[in-house]
Amino acid sequence: MKKVLTFVLLACVLVALSFGATTITVSGWPGNPTEEAGIKAVIDAFNASQDQIVAVWEPVPGDFRQMLITRLSAGTGPDIFYVDVNWFDEVAGKNLLLGLDMYIRRDGYDVEDFYASLIDGFSYRDRVYGFPKDFSTLALFYNKEMFDKAGVAYPNHEDSWNDFRVKLEELKAAGIETPLVIVPDVNRFLPLVYSFGGQFVDENLDSAIDDPKTVKALDYYVSLVQDGLAQEPASVGATWIGEAFGKGEVALAMSGPWSVGYLRDSFPQTWEKTAIAELPHGEKRSTMIYTVCYAINRGTPNKDAAWEVLKYLTGVEGQGLWAEKTGILASRQSLAVLDTDPTKTAFYLGAEYGSAWKVETPSGIFSEANTQINSVLKDLFYEETTLDEAVQFIKANYASWVEER
Amino acid sequence: MKEKTRESLYGYLFASPIILSILIFTIIPVFTALYYSFTNYSPLDARKYEFSFNPQDALSMHLGFFPDEQGLTVEGLAEWIDVELFMDLDVGVNLDEEQVALVKQHLDVNRLLQDFLDGKLATEMPLKEFMGTYLTQGSEKFQRYVPKWVWLDNFNKMLHDEYFWISLKNAFFFSIVVVPVQTLIAVLLAVVANTPIRGKGFFKAIFFLPSITSSAAISMIFMLIYTKPGILNRLLGIVGIVPVDWLENPATALPAVMIMNIWTTAGYFMVTFLAGLQSIPTSIYEAAEIDGAGFNRKFWQITLPLLRPQVLFVSIMGFIGCMQVFDQIYFLIKNIRNMTTSFYIYQNAFQYGRMGYASAIAMALFVVILAITMIQRKLVPDEAYF
C-alpha cells in the first residue's frame, strides 16, 4: 500500500512539474560534498524565488566532456551545463552553445562585473557564450615547518624563479629528499612560459616552442626533476599534488584552492603548518586560471527559461550563495572584494595577471596536442629524450595535432 | 498459411530478440564504422541543421538594427548584409565551400529583409526550414548532415602517423609475450588442478577468481602494488633492488601491465584446458606408465599434443583479446608511448574528435587480427591427432 501511495504521489509531482512549470536541467560534474550541497542550495533558492521554472541539478560522474559531447550529438543534452574554459572553444566552434549577447542586451545584464580575464575565456569570435561560475588560480603552497627545520627563508611575493630554485637547492642540501612536487602537464608549465616572457603559440596559432624564452622555461621546468629537486606525486606514493604535499613528503607544491579544502579535511596537521604565496615571477608575473562556465544548450526548447536560470546562477545573488556555501573564488568582482579569507589572497591576486587555461587552435581542439606534449614533458623528466629533440619534435608535429578535422 | 511457413515464422519469432540485438548492436555498427572510415565524420556536427534559431535576432545582431527602427528600407539594409558572415557567425553554422557558394548565390536577401522589416521573423525556426524558405535553390544540401567522403585520406594519414605504428607495435609486443606465457601457465594450472590432490576445488576457484573480478578493481589494486612505495618495491628492496616507479616509467609500464594481464587471464583459460584434459582417455596414460614414462614425459608427449585443439582455441582467443586490450591500458598507462591500438582508437574517437580516423584505425586493427588468426589456423592444423 505504501509503495502504491509513493508511486501515486511521485506521478502527481511529475505531472505537476510537466504541466505547471518549465523544467530546466542543469548538469555538470559532481564536486565534493560541500560543493554538491552548495549547488543544491543555489538551485533550491532559485526554485523558491519563482514558480514558472523548475531547475533540476543532474550531476554526471566520470568523464563529463565525453558524456556531454555524446549527448549533444544525439540531441539529448541538458539545458544548461558546465563548460571548462579548456574545451570551450571546441563546443563553441561547433555552434553548440546559445549565444548570449542578445539576452544580455535585452535584459541589460551586468557582465562588466566579471573579471575580464574570465569572461574573455568564454567568448568565441567576440560573442559571449557562458558566464564563469567561479575560478581557481595556481599559487605556491609551502610547509613552514620543513622550511624552519632546514633554516631556509620562506618563499615570498618578491621571489624570482631563480630565487625559487636556490631555495629548493638549500632545502635539498638540508636533507629534504624531494623539496617540490610537480607534474608533466602543459597547464603547470604554461605559467613559466608566460612569466619567462615566452609564448606557447604564435599569432598564426603555430607552435612557438622554439622561442628562446620558451625553451628556457622548458629547460627550467624539466631540470627541476632531472636535478632531483622535484618529483612526480607517484614517486612519493601519492596520486596527485595535494596528497603528496599533505603527506608531508614535499616542502612545496604549486596548486590551486581545491587543495585548501582537501588539506584542511584530510591532512589537518599539514594544513596547520601550511602557508600560501604567489608563484615566483620571471620577467613578468603569471599563473594559470582555471574556470568553468554555465552555458546554455543551443538545442534546448526552452531558451528563455534557461536564460532565467543562468542569470540567477551567475548573478550576484546566486553566486553569492554559492560562494558563501563553498568558499570558492567568486568570478564577480563585487563579490570578490567582500571575501576577506586570508588564505585566498594569493589566489585572488592571480586573477589580475593570470592567463586562462586554454590554448587557441585552428580546430578549437587542444586535447591531442595536450596529450602529446605531456608525454614529451614526461620523457624529459626521465631523460628519455633531450631538450633539442623534444623542441624539434613538438615543432614538427604540432600542426597535425591541432589541425581542422 | 502453409504449415512449413508458419513453423519457420515461429522460429524466427523466437530467435528475433537475438537476431535484432546482433543486427542493431553488431552488424550495423560494423558497417557504419566501415563507412565512417572513408569520411571525416564528426559527431558534433550531426545536428547542425536541426538547431532552431530566431532569424530576427540573428539579423539584428548582424545588421546592428532592430526591425522597428525608423527609416529602414530593404535596399538600405541589403548593403549591410554579408551573407557568408551572417550564416557563419549570426546564424551559427559551419558550412563547406560548396554550401557557402550556394548561399551567396541563391539566398533570397530581398525577401529575407522584407520579412525582417514586416516583423515576420520573430519566431524560432530550425535551420533546415529557414534554408528551405529563403534559398531559391539548393536547399536540399542543408537538410541532413552528411560527412564528407575523403576516400583513403584516413588510411593514408594512418600510414604516416608515428603513434599508430607505436600503438600497433605495443599491441604486438603485448600479444607475443602474453599469449604464449598465459597459455603455458593455463596448461600447467589445469594439469595441477586435474591431479587428485587435496583441496583442488579450492585451488580451481582461486585460479579462476581473477577472471570474474572486475577489471577496474584489479587495475586499481595493481596500481597500488606497482607504485614506488608499493608492496612490489618493498619486496624487491629486501633483495636490494632500487625502487622503480613501474607504471610511470615508460620502459617498465607495458611489461607491468602484461604481468597483470597474464595473472588475470591464465585462470580463465585453465577452465578450457581442464575440459580438454577430461577428454583424454586415461588408458593412454596407463599404457605410458606401464612403459615407464614419468610425469615430464607424459606431459610433453601425451598431454600437450592431445590438447592441441584447446591450445589452438586458447591462443587464437588470447591473441584477439590481447590485440584489443583496452581497459587495463586505459586504467594504468599514463604515457602515450605505451598505449595500444584500441586505446589509440578511443583517444581519437572520444578525445580528439576524429571519429572518421578512429574508424579507419579500427578497420586496420580488424584486418591485422583477421590475418593473424588465419595464419594461426594454417600453422596449427586442428584435429591432427584424431
Image: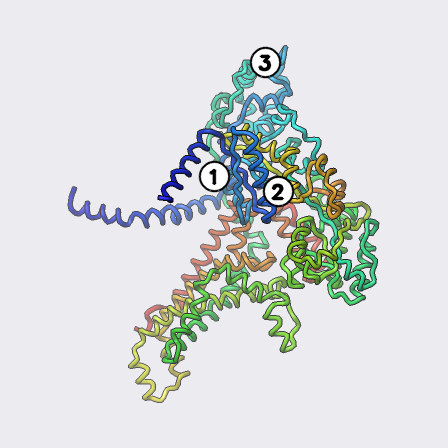
Which of A82/B136 is in front? A82
Q: Amino acid at mark 3?
A: Val
Name the chain under label 2: A
| B133 over A206 or under it: above or below | above
Q: Nearer the viewer, mark 2 or mark 3?
A: 2
Which residue is situated farthest in the front direction here? A1
Q: Amino acid at mark 1?
A: Ala
Where is mark 2, residue-wise? A84
Mark 1–mark 3 Cα distance, whole angstroms, equals 39 Å
Residue at 30% in and 85% down: B287
- Residue B117 seen from this side: yes
Q: Which mark is residue A74?
A: 1
| A288 over B70 or under it: above or below | below
Mark 2–mark 3 Cα distance, whole angstroms, equals 42 Å
List x then y, in percent, for residue A57.
Answer: 53, 40
Mark 1 closeness class: few <14, some 14–19, many ≥20 residues within 10 Å: few
Element at label 3: helix
Q: How is the image coloured?
A: rainbow
Q: Which mark is residue B74?
A: 3
